[in-house]
Amino acid sequence: MNIRLKTKLSFGLVFLFIVIVLFGVLGLYYINRLSDEGRQVLQNNHESLVYGNRMLEALEDIRTDKNALDIFRDNLKKQQGNITEVGERRLQTS
């Protein structure tokens, strides 16, 4: 089995090219996955800020608005259902 040096080099370069393409594809996959996860975290945190702001406004209006307590409770329930971190539900119940 006598393989020429040129053929061996060609096989080696093809192998390296395949490895580089594979790493590129895996890198793109994981970058997109992290981007999606980051977008979801930002969206959940924005919802938390909105609920907190509505609860604060309801507490400020509690003496003048009869519905303020209901608004506060409604937004508190929504915030408690907005689970954004691993293990957060377990901490809420304890």
Image: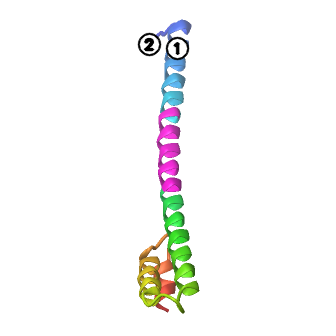
Quarter occupied by the N terminus = top left
Q: How is the image coloured?
A: rainbow
Badge number at residue 1 = 2
Badge number at residue 63 = none
The mark nearer the N terminus, 1 or 2, is 2
Q: Nearer the viewer, residue 53 or 46?
A: 53
Task: Residue under label 1, please give it.
Answer: 8
Label 1: state its secondary structure. Answer: helix
Seen in the picture, residue 20 relative to 48 is either above or below; the reply is: above
Predominant SS of the magenta segment: helix
Q: Nearer the viewer, residue 54 or 28?
A: 54
**Residue 65 appears anywhere in the view:** yes
Task: Assess disc 2: are there few (<14), some (14-19) or many (≥20) residues with their C-alpha within 10 Å of its C-alpha.
Answer: few
Residue ID at (49%, 60%): 43
Residue ID at (47%, 35%): 25
Q: Amino acid under label 1?
A: Lys
Q: Amino acid under label 2?
A: Met
Task: Assess disc 1: are there few (<14), some (14-19) or many (≥20) residues with their C-alpha within 10 Å of its C-alpha.
Answer: few
Give the x, y percent position of residue 90: 47, 84
The magenta span reads: 24-39
Number of numbered labels in the structure image: 2
Residue ID at (49%, 69%): 84
Residue 90 magenta-highlighted: no
